[in-house]
Image (spheres, helix red, strand yellow):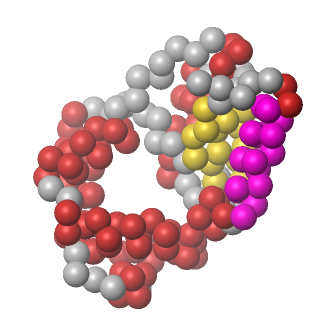
Amino acid sequence: MHNLFFDGAPMIRLSRAYKAFMRLKFGTMIKIFRDKSLEEAMNMKFLKQFAGNKINSLKPMIESLITIAPYLTKNSLKNEVECCYTFDFPALDEAMQKRTYFFYGEDEKAYKTCYKLVKKAYPYANYRIEKGHGHYSCEHTDEYVNWLQDIIEASEISGFW
């Protein structure tokens, strides 16, 4: 691997009880989205409470959830939660950390819960925190893609690709 990119990554290890709670919460959310149009989902009270004034930044994710909701099983929901909330912080040497990029919006839940742990585990990594934003790559896709292209081009020049 030449570079690692993590966008809003929920890098945390939660207890078994908390993961069970998150499975229930995620499962309930999926049930709510089943058989809903994107417009119906975007106007749901709980979503507005969850996202506040950043609801449009969630639109691409909500659209994806609506698309996959009919196909998700209890087992796939369990695997999703395990994936998101069981992170072991694998060792990366200093050189690899310097080619690792973490991107968070300051208002993202993952930033608020994970950033300090990630920063401690990977002190030489590159961090970009967008103040006043939720999931920035959904809000500002073109700028986000340009940022990734700049990193890739710099890597090509330095011989990492």
Q: Which residue does the image show at 49% across and 73% down from the upper left?
A: 59
Determine if the magenta segment contains residue 147: yes
Q: Is residue 94 visible?
A: yes
| Residue 59, placed above or below residue 36 | above
Magenta segment's dominant SS is helix
Range of the magenta residues? 142-156
- Residue 133 location, x and y as percent? 66, 61
- Residue 98 location, x and y as percent? 73, 23
Question: Which image quarter is the C terminus in?
Answer: top right
Q: Which residue does the image show at 36% across and 75% down from the upper left?
A: 46
Q: Is residue 44 visible?
A: no
Q: What is the number of callouts on the image? A: 0
- Residue 135 location, x and y as percent? 58, 59
Q: Quadrant of residue 17?
A: top left
| Residue 81, placed above or below residue 116 | below
- Residue 142 location, x and y as percent? 72, 64
Q: Quadrant of residue 121?
A: top right
Question: Which image quarter is the N terminus in?
Answer: top right
Of residue 134 and residue 15, the one placed in the foreground of this image is 134
Q: Which residue does the image show at 61% across and 32% down from the upper left?
A: 4
| Residue 93, placed above or below residue 116 | above
Q: Quadrant of residue 48?
A: bottom left
Of residue 27 and residue 146, the one placed in the foreground of this image is 146
Q: Which residue does the image show at 58% across and 16% down from the upper left?
A: 92
Determine if the magenta segment contains residue 88: no
